[in-house]
Amino acid sequence: MDRSRAVATLRRTVAEFAAQVEGEHWCVALSGGPDSLALTATAAAERPTVALIVDHGLQAGSRAVAETARQQALSVGCVAAQIIPVVVGRSGGPEAAARKARYTALRAARDGAPVLLGHTLDDQAETVLLGLARGSGPRSIAGMRPHDPPWHRPFLGIRRAVTHAACDELGLKPWHDPHNFEPRFTRTRLRLDVLPLLEEVLGGGVAEALARTATALREDTDTLDQIAQQALDAAQTPTPGLAVPVLADLPDAVRRRVIRAWLLVNGGTDLTDVQIRGVDRLVTAWRGQGGVAVGSNLSRQRLFVGRRNCELVLYAEPV
């Protein structure tokens, strides 16, 4: 990327994106890396910006990294820059635990303002590949949304090389997270090994193609979700449950979306494709089998979906 044009490209992107984000000011999640640092600089030129810097405390010197990020945020015109220390748990592995702690902290600190995230087209391509590998269905392969309030991602159509070039052009000194080069992390292996190999074997353009795939699938998924919401309204019973005869008449893809939406509304969390299909079999292939355990945030209990005559119902059992 021509360094002399990188900043202009990002500023134009953020200016066009701003028309779709409400609010007189916004926040930027700033790690100190080149993507979020370039976003912070260009966002501050467009609208009053508060930089939110989450210190995970997972590496020696993390506070100094956060402080450097804070100072650079103020130097590019942010109206404020706040360091937020967090304690990272262990649930779901180190990457998932850090992400959960980070988003919880950002949600609490944003004070009602939208939050811009520095995910790029390269991040989107990695996300699509992860979804493919997990076999978790089109929703996962559809990747990240440009707008998922309060989260907004202006750079999903921008390559990572552009944000690096913009930092050079602006004279900023981004932090390069050592974890981004740790082969024990799946996303790192995708970034350093898998995607470059795919680009070589397939002749280039793979990252862009994966991002286009995400966009196309997201449009399809949004349409099916709208249809499923109408079907959910028709299928709900006062229990609250779902009427099996209504579900049985739905196309498979719509029925599973109805089940997913119903579970989320009633306390389900971290739902997997395996769980949803298990519940679906209570509708399509019930032979008197027992309930299906689904993810939830219940303490010392497990959430189950069972079949009661012509209705799906929820119940909890002690762990």
Image (tube, rainbow, N blue to C red):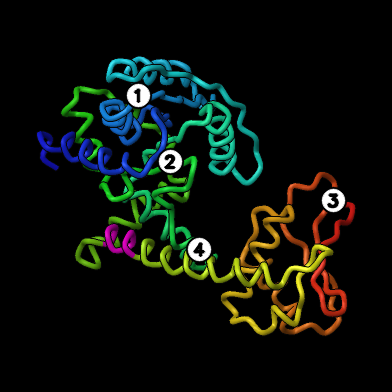
Q: Nearer the viewer, residue 165 or 10?
A: 10
At label 2, the amino acid type is: Glu
Q: Nearer the viewer, mark 1 or mark 4?
A: 1
Q: Nearer the viewer, mark 2 or mark 3?
A: 3
SS at circle 1: loop
- Please state if 157 lies on the left or on the right of 98 as rendered: left
Q: Nearer the viewer, residue 123 or 149?
A: 149
Query: Real-space Cα distance between discs 4 and 2?
Result: 28 Å
Rendering quarter of residue 179: top left
Residue 51 at what x, y percent from top left? 41, 24
Residue 84 at what x, y percent from top left? 53, 22
Q: Residues within 10 Å of mark 4 (few under 14, many from 20)?
A: some
Dot placed on the residue nearer the N-terminal end, 1 or 3: 1
SS at circle 2: loop
Magenta span: 206-212
Which circle marks residue 301 in the picture?
3
Q: Residues within 10 Å of mark 3 (few under 14, many from 20)?
A: few
Q: Mark 4 = which residue?
A: 139
Q: Is residue 263 magenta?
A: no
Query: Real-space Cα distance between discs 1 and 4?
Result: 34 Å
Q: Mark 2 = which residue?
A: 182
Query: Which residue lies at the image location 49% right of the left edge and 44% below the top edge?
Result: 149
Which circle marks residue 48 in the picture?
1
